[in-house]
Image (tube, rainbow, N blue to C red):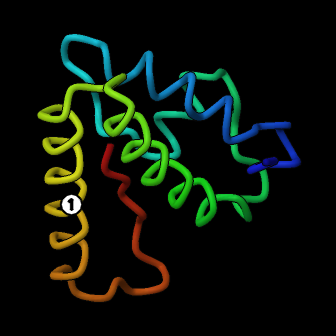
Amino acid sequence: MIVCSCQQVSDFDIELALLDILNEPEAPIPTPGVVYRYMQKRMQCCGCAPLAVDVIYAKLEDLEARGLVCPYRSFSTRERLLRLQQQRSKQPAMAPDAAVETVE
């Protein structure tokens, strides 16, 4: 399945990137930005971001079920993503002219 038509990224490309990323000693949270940078791609229109997130979550579960990713690593990643999401939901709304800060 094509996830990003701008950069020709498929779900299989994401799966291969996740395998490499999650097997690094200090693996980062596999956000779309991390995965795309690993593949040396850039989101252009960002229309694929919601689908990329869904594919990343689905692939994490699939790789864990197939025994290709350590269940602890997968659990740890999901736990960190949940904490990040909770932190973002607690932040007050930003003013339109405020500087945007990204968390990676």
Farthest residue to the top: give it. Answer: 25
Vertical placement of residue 10 versus 85, above or below: above
Residue at left offset 39%, top offset 39%:
30
Q: Which residue is tagged 1? A: 84
Vertical placement of residue 47 versus 86, above or below: above
Residue at left offset 70%, top offset 46%:
43
> Quarter holding the C terminus?
top left
Q: Count how many numbered circles sit on residues in the image.
A: 1
Front position in the image: 4 or 62: 62
* Whole-percent x, y for residue 79 in the image: 14, 53
31 lies left or right of 41: left
Vertical placement of residue 32 versus 24, above or below: below
> Crowdedness of circle 1 by 10 Å Cα count: few (<14), some, many (20+)?
some
Q: Amino acid at mark 1?
A: Leu
Residue at left offset 42%, top offset 53%:
57
Front position in the image: 82 or 61: 61
* Whole-percent x, y for residue 101 in the image: 36, 57
**Judging from the image, what secondary structure is the residue with disc 1 in?**
helix
56 lies left or right of 11: left
* Whole-percent x, y for residue 50 in the image: 59, 66
59 lies left or right of 77: right
Rendered image quadrant of residue 69 = top left
Residue at left offset 16%, top offset 50%:
80
* Whole-percent x, y for residue 71 in the image: 18, 35
